[in-house]
Image (cartoon, grey):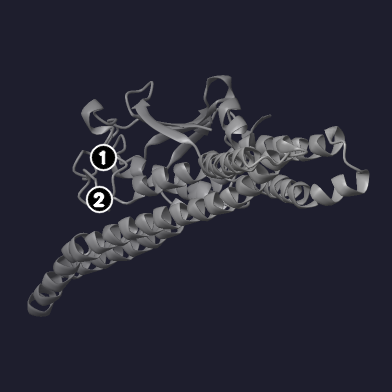
Amino acid sequence: MSTLSAPSVGVGDTMRRASMILLGLVLLALSILNIVVSDADLWLRLVESGLPTGLALFFLVFAIHLYERNEQPDAMVVITGWALAGGAVTGALGVWLLAVVSLQGEVIRDPSYVVASAATVGATFGGAAGYYHAQLRDTASELQRQNMRLDEFASIVSHDLRNPLSVAMGGTELAKETGNPEDFERVHLAHERMDRMIGELLTLARQGVDLSDLEPVSLQAVAADAQRTVGQDLDIRFHDDTKLRADPERLAAVFENLFRNSVEHGSTSSRDGESRPDDAGEHAGPTIEVGLLANDDGFYVADDGPGIPLDERDDVFDQGYTTASQGTGIGLAIVRRVADAHGWDVRVTESESGGARFEFYT
């Protein structure tokens, strides 16, 4: 059994995340170098270098802390940029002050120490300003994502839920007049659809929360649990099994929604969601395959249904997009959101039987 790791971090991302640590090492090295090369008494050198050395150590420890907690590479670059800017400004100020003092006839004993100390102090405070800026940017981005989710929810409540509600209300009036069981069935189906949409809406909201704790989970075990949860007539064939680092509940949501999507658009269903008989005259569920991609780059879920036209593959993950009369248009949006939360890429292609194939690159 192979093991898929969590999303791999490229060399470029690692270097960007380590940029702040490298700057901290440079600042600390400059402070120590001034202690070594100065010709002043040792006690005086230690006193003079106490503040810049302490600030350099603080900067380095804080940089290591951010690195270990997996701070985003872009945020680390922003903080490093602010620190460099702060060091450049105060370093230039030190050079200017030295020039002014020299023009007045004063002799500066350790000019490099003055410039390096000023740059260290400026870099530390510049880094603090950069961290504050990065936090503000992250907060603004999160607020923007929340506003987008609120817009999605408002669209579902105001439009998508109104349709089955209207069906239920109309069916109730007809049922009162006629007592026809078919009218009661329409009300029942409309309520079932509203209940499913509300459940999927809540799931969609939860997937927007960032992942924190991942654990090794069996791909086959999670998919099998999802099959039992869906409770449909599904023929699922597992070609491979693996363990990958994921959130088991959210991974189960991926399989559940893909399985439901296969049922709604499966081999025995038409494009409008109406079931049709198979060759034997009976109704049969779709056949679904779950397996690993080549080189263990991820996994796939494929079915033998009618597939997804090429010109629609970019739209299927949009919230509200569906071609089935009983579809909610939320299921595949949940799939994309879970994949994004894990750092996975998801693509839609065609299966060997001409059906839909969803590929997850981890």
Q: Are marks 1 and 2 in contact (CB under 8 Å)?
A: no
* Residue drawn at the location 34% of the way across and 43% of the way down: 261
| Residue 320: numbered disc | 2
Q: Position of residue 316 (x, y in %)?
A: 29, 39
**Residue at the outermost left position:** 177
Disc 1 versus disc 2: distance between alpha carbons? Answer: 20 Å
Between discs 1 and 2, the one toward the N terminus:
1
| As drawn, 309 above or below 87 | above
Query: In this image, 56 relative to 267: left or right?
Result: right
* Residue furthest out toward the front: 105
Amino acid residing under circle 1: Ser
Spot the residue most to the right.
42
* Residue 46 coordinates in the image, percent (x, y): 86, 48
Residue 255 appears anywhere in the view? no
Residue at 55% from the left image edge and 52% from the top image edge: 131
276 horizontally vs 232: left or right: left
The answer to which of 328 and 104 lies nearer the viewer is 104
Q: Nearer the viewer, residue 165 or 88?
A: 88
The residue carrying mark 1 is: 269
Q: Locate residue 273, reporting x and y percent.
A: 22, 45
Q: Which quadrant holds residue 359?
A: top left
* Secondary element at tag 2: loop
Name the mark nearer the viewer: 1 or 2. 2
| Circle on res. 283 | none
Give the quadrant of the N terminus: top right
Tell whether 25 sits left or right of 272.
right
Q: How many marks?
A: 2
Give the residue at x 92% y 44%: 42
Quadrant of the image occupied by residue 182: bottom left
Which x, y percent locates residue 321? 24, 46
Three-letter amino acid code at disc 2? Answer: Gly
Looking at the picture, tell me which residue is in the foreground, 276 or 106.
106
